Amino acid sequence: MNDAIGIIEMFGFVTAITAADAAAKAADVKVIAIDSNKPANADSVEVPLIMAVKVQGILGPSYG
């Protein structure tokens, strides 16, 4: 069976680590990458870092 890949985007490093931890604990997925990106308007936002957590795993109730 093929695995699904998901991307969760958020502001801030701590939020990204928390989301990765929650995803790994809540489902049969593994975290494959945590990426960061500083947007062009970074000087005007409160948290100037956009993070993306990439996960891979089996989704849905039919696995097992």
Image (cartoon, rainbow, N blue to C red):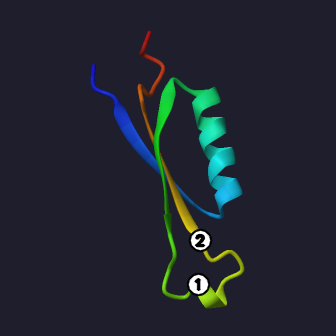
- Chain-order first, disc 1 or disc 2: 1
The quarter of the rendered structure image containing the C terminus is top left
Q: Specify the quadrant of the image occupied by residue 24.
A: top right
- Residue in view at x 45 percent, y 25 percent: 60
The amino acid type, in three-letter code, at marker 1 is Ala
The label shown at residue 2 is: none
**Whether residue 19 is situated above or below residue 2 in the rendered picture:** below
Closer to us: 25 or 43: 43
Give amino acid for label 2.
Answer: Leu
Task: Give the percent coordinates (x, y) of residue 36.
Answer: 51, 63
- Seen at 65% across and 90% down, the residue is 44
Q: Which quadrant does the N terminus fall into?
A: top left
Circle on res. 49? 2
Pointer 1 residue: 42
Q: How far apart are marks 1 and 2 (CA)?
A: 7 Å
For residue 19, above or below residue 25: below
Answer left or right for 13 relative to 27.
right
**Element on which disc 2 rests:** loop
Answer whether labels 1 and 2 touch (C-beta < 8 Å). yes
Mark 2 surroundings: few (<14), some (14-19) or many (≥20) residues within 10 A: some
**In the displayed image of the protein, which residue is found farthest to the left?**
1
Q: In this view, does 1 lie to the left or right of 53?
A: left
User: Relative to residue 1, is residue 41 drawn left or right?
Assistant: right
Residue at (51, 23) in percent of width and height: 28
